[in-house]
Image (cartoon, grey):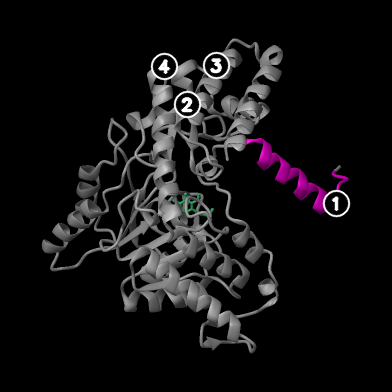
Amino acid sequence: MIKESYEEIIELERQRQEHNVELIASENFPSQRVLNACGSILTNKYAEGYSGKRYYGGCKYIDMIETKAIEDVCKLFNCNFANVQPHCGSSANQAVYRALINTGDTVMGMDLGAGGHLTHGHKMSFSGQDYNIIPYGIDENGIIDYEEFEKLMYEHNPKMVIVGASSYSRTIDYKRFRDIIEKYAESHDGERPYYMVDMAHVAGLIAGGAHPSPFPYADVVTSTTHKTLRGPRGGLILTNSEEIIKKINRAVFPGIQGGPLEHIIAAKGICFEEDATEEFKVYAHQVVKNAKAFAESFLKEGWKIISGGTDNHMFVLDVYDSIGITGKEAEEELDRIHITLNKNQIPNDQLPPLKSSGVRIGTPAMTTKGWKEADFEKLARIIMDYLKICKDGKQEENREEYVEKVVRLIESVKAEQ
Ligand SMILES: Cc1ncc(COP(=O)(O)O)c(C=O)c1O
């Protein structure tokens, strides 16, 4: 039975976030400005509709906020139109399906096992239930199989293709996908599927110039705002097409959502402003440098990483192949020494999702806390040594020592700030 008040529990979670090494690839620490907007009085306001066309009175300032957030995100990603109302990444994706295609239509999305997201066609998601999904995957080297994608497109004639992933550590060639789609159109009387990019994981890297942009190649781009973008928990949709944004706007409201979360939209706007700074560019590049150094530390010791390394903010470490423990065991044991990450299936995983052979490791959050390559190299040493101890069943007697090592590492970076 939980006895503490909500405030006390929030404080406990705040302390956990402060005293743990946060390696979940989709998490980050937004600025105090972003947090303040999330907790602001804007949450009091109903504003169904869009700027200038609301179903409620008193929206003068709300309109200013939403219009500014749209302008800022369009400037950041160099595109023409945006909808900043989706409550999360999954809602943004759902709105795109609803806006552009019909129930039952064929859609190609990256397989969850290869690194895709649930909303790209998994059978437990609305996407896999309401649409005819043709999954595509990665080759034996762990790289997107562009040739297989092309072949499947000609075989299945999709109405929409989705490019983007939740656990894929290599640069995504958005132009190559567009070229494949254009070539297909040439042999299909100019008809082609919509090209949707879900950049949720790499959006901050794109904003900071550390990953290529899906513009001008994609028809429509979705994202979350809480991962590498370092904003509040939320979603967004971007496009260069006026026709598409009209459909998207109707699909978001009244299609799948009611009143927008204007406190979150203000926080998104602040994050877009912050992401346009030189400081954020430096951050985005540091995230990638850190991930590369971190991955290299494991590779040097013969540990296995899917695709053999990383070009972005994360990688999937095959702990089962490397030392014979499951992703679940690694997640739980590392949590006990204040290191937070998540188990993750590897391609063609022989273990079920709740066990998994791998763990997903990301650098965005600790890079926000000022960590550099050498810090991640030290952390890799701690992780490898501790997991080997766990494999030998000697974790009980060694745990305290490893907690201290992690605490010392966190404190040493803090002291340098
Ligand atoms: C690629 C991708 N798209 C969409 C989502 C969904 O975002 P949310 O959890 O905000 O619904 C995620 C979340 O992990 C993701 O990785």
- In the image, residue 408 sits, relative to residue 159, either above or below, namely above
Q: What residue would you read off at disc 1?
A: 5
Of the numbered discs 4 and 2, the one sitting upstream in the chain is 4
In which quadrant is the N terminus drawn?
top right
Please give the name of the residue rendered at 13% of the width and 68% of the height, measured from the top-left corner. 189
Q: Quadrant of residue 137?
A: top left
Question: Given the image, on which type of amino acid does mark 4 rest?
Answer: Glu
For marks 3 and 2, give the CA distance.
12 Å
Question: What is the crowding at mark 3: few (fewer than 14 residues within 10 Å), some, or many (at least 20)?
Answer: few
Of the numbered discs 1 and 2, the one sitting upstream in the chain is 1
Please give the name of the residue rendered at 47% of the width and 63% of the height, measured from the top-left corner. 272
Is residue 114 part of the magenta span, yes or no?
Answer: no
Numbered mark located on residue 377 in the image: 2
For marks 4 and 1, give the CA distance.
46 Å
Q: What residue would you read off at disc 3?
A: 385
Q: Which residues are magenta?
A: 2-20
Q: Percent x, y for residue 151? A: 20, 47
Numbered mark located on residue 301 in the image: 4
| Left or right placement of residue 12 versus residue 293 in this view | right
Query: 375 or 39, which is in the foreground?
Result: 375
